[in-house]
Amino acid sequence: MVDDRKSRVLAAVINQYLESAEPVGSRTLARRNGFGLSAATLRNELADLEEWGYLDKPHTSAGRVPSDKGYRYYVDRLLVRRTLPAQEGVRIRAAYRAQVREATWFLQQTARLLSSLTGYPAVVVMPAPRMPRLLSLQLLPLGEGGAALLAETDTGLVAHRILSIPADLAPADLAHMTSVLSRELAGRPLAEVADVHLAYLERALGRHAALVEELLSLLPGGDTDREPLATVEGFDTLFGLPEFHEVARIRAVWELLTRDTFVGRLLAGLGDEPMAVRIGRELADMADHDLSLVSATLRSGGQVLGHVAVVGPRRMDYGHVLAAVEQVATEWNRALG
Amino acid sequence: MVDDRKSRVLAAVINQYLESAEPVGSRTLARRNGFGLSAATLRNELADLEEWGYLDKPHTSAGRVPSDKGYRYYVDRLLVRRTLPAQEGVRIRAAYRAQVREATWFLQQTARLLSSLTGYPAVVVMPAPRMPRLLSLQLLPLGEGGAALLAETDTGLVAHRILSIPADLAPADLAHMTSVLSRELAGRPLAEVADVHLAYLERALGRHAALVEELLSLLPGGDTDREPLATVEGFDTLFGLPEFHEVARIRAVWELLTRDTFVGRLLAGLGDEPMAVRIGRELADMADHDLSLVSATLRSGGQVLGHVAVVGPRRMDYGHVLAAVEQVATEWNRALG
DNA sequence: CGTTAGCACTCTCCATACGAGAGTGCTAAG
DNA sequence: CTTAGCACTCTCGTATGGAGAGTGCTAACG
């Protein structure tokens, strides 16, 4: 069994590996981390930890490297949950003091903040197996031939679209459309809006019915909506990391993070745990990429809205990343709660 | 002097290099491009072209590679201006048939389109030494504690911001603010809006004056505005190119493209030429990066709004890229004209 | 006189070899 | 159980030696 001393050895190996990014040998381990144990004794301990699957050896005569299982044990049982440095807490709170409530802006700022706190790429996703409900919907006239479509949802965020409309559509027509659409659609999940049977609307709106159909397809989740509520920021942080010294690896991660389906799977895989850590092959999509993911769930009321996550190499400072992700999610939930 | 035959040789070298990305030798050149000349004769021609600076030699016994000057000559005098494949023209026109007139969305779609047409990263910038004028400004109430700020400019695009406001601010107050702000600010260049002396506004708006100041800072170009009108899309196209097989080069380009100041300089360097090509060291910022840039100017009326550009390795298919950039700029200008 | 064939020379690239360095596993002594 | 010592293994950097491709030059040719 993993006794106390072996735990300390494992922790020491991981900590050193987090810093150096290079296989940890018994000699240097003994020197830097004077357990009062010699290198030879540590060799025995390391051999045991390897046999049990907590450590790997890149090749026969290299040092040891943590395995998925090793990191998992470390995260679950050895990690001392530090609290975030005061200064970083202040940054997070300051970020959510802003008054802007635009969906895309909000996601982007959050991802940017988290990436800059952790030094890894950050992802914020708000997709929708269970879509937010539409609270209100407004169609507002702008100058010559323009209109704004504003959709307020129960997520606390507002989606919007600005478009041009036929010149012969008077402000009064817009107002009429707004009231019909509001009456008909308010309270429905956004995902259903596209499927609403439009027969009634078509009769009520006469020759502008076609326009309505186009409008609805512009709402988030609609057919024409090209801007899924998912943001990745801080991709460039990867450039500096030794595990991404080959273009092929960087490219693979880029493709992973920008692939549409990744977002959906991410959500499915994470469920509604408040905080989740996925290491290496634990997350199917990331197998072979040597990536880890630390995420938190965004909620409003009882409902899961999405996730905020940090994606990085398996060799990441889980303590700090966990604290940062948790704190950001907490502030988000508070700001929109 | 560069006679007709030397021109043909230069063109052949460049064309072959565009395909192979590898130094072109006299032997293969003679084989593929039967000028009716032997390799030995071509060697003489190549030696002349090199001496005059149109070609470079990576090392003594490699083939020849076009220099900046060589590409320049090719672009200015040898390039046959092909017209864009019909299919691509259709894609471009289709893209601008959409009715959306949101500034950020518009820029993003344009960059994405251009990148996918050319296979290189595309940049769209609409910064502002000479900022667009504010046509109208509206402050609209949303459900509970929310408001939308819409600013329509004479660029044909609409900038917007959604934010939360104090609960005690009634719709009537918003309407009042809208009318005061509109009267005061309409017709002014956006860049000046932040500097407008607010004394009058403060008196007119009483206790909500502070809010106004915050609002104005959210307008594009304002202090708090974090979303400069500049978009880069298609960065991942670089991953496949042989000139970017080292992470360091990719990183350098990433930093160039995302650096704030790049956008401003880009504009300054391009002036108002309808179309511009900058090769390698011709553009100071891109020295040492072996990059080229093909750009077109976006205008509305007589005014320069910004630029749309493709950034890629010097070894790019200038003919096709030029055609694509030109066509996209033309359609943009038509769509918003 | 321009063009071409031939040839010696140069430079890169790749595969191989080899020693240095770091680490391991095992054995035997404390 | 812990530790020192030792033989062994594997990587990595450097050196070495063709093979391949291309050049420049010279001399012959139409």
Image (cartoon, coloured by chain):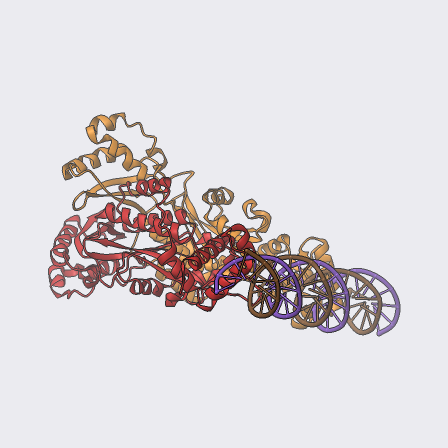
Chain colours: A orange, B red, C purple, D brown
Horizontal relation, residue B171 to residue A16: left or right: left
> What number of labels is visible?
0
Quadrant in the rendering for residue A173: top left
Left or right: where does residue A280 sit relative to residue B225? right
Residue drawn at the location 73% of the way across and 57% of the way down = A48
Does residue B217 lie above or below B92 as drawn? below
Q: Nearer the viewer, residue B187 or A286?
A: B187
Q: Position of residue A118 (x, y in %)?
A: 47, 61
Residue B192's spot in the image, x, y percent? 19, 63
Q: Nearer the viewer, residue B126 or C4?
A: C4
Seen at 30% across and 41% down, the residue is B93
Q: Is residue A286 visible?
A: yes
Q: Is residue A336 visible?
A: no
**In which quadrant will I find the N terminus of chain A?**
bottom right
On the rendered structure, is A103 left or right of B287? left
Q: Is residue B66 above or below residue A272?
A: below
Q: Provide residue D16's location: percent of width, then percent of height.
A: 73, 69
In which quadrant of the rendered view does residue B208 lie? bottom left
Residue A300 locus on image (x, y percent): 38, 46
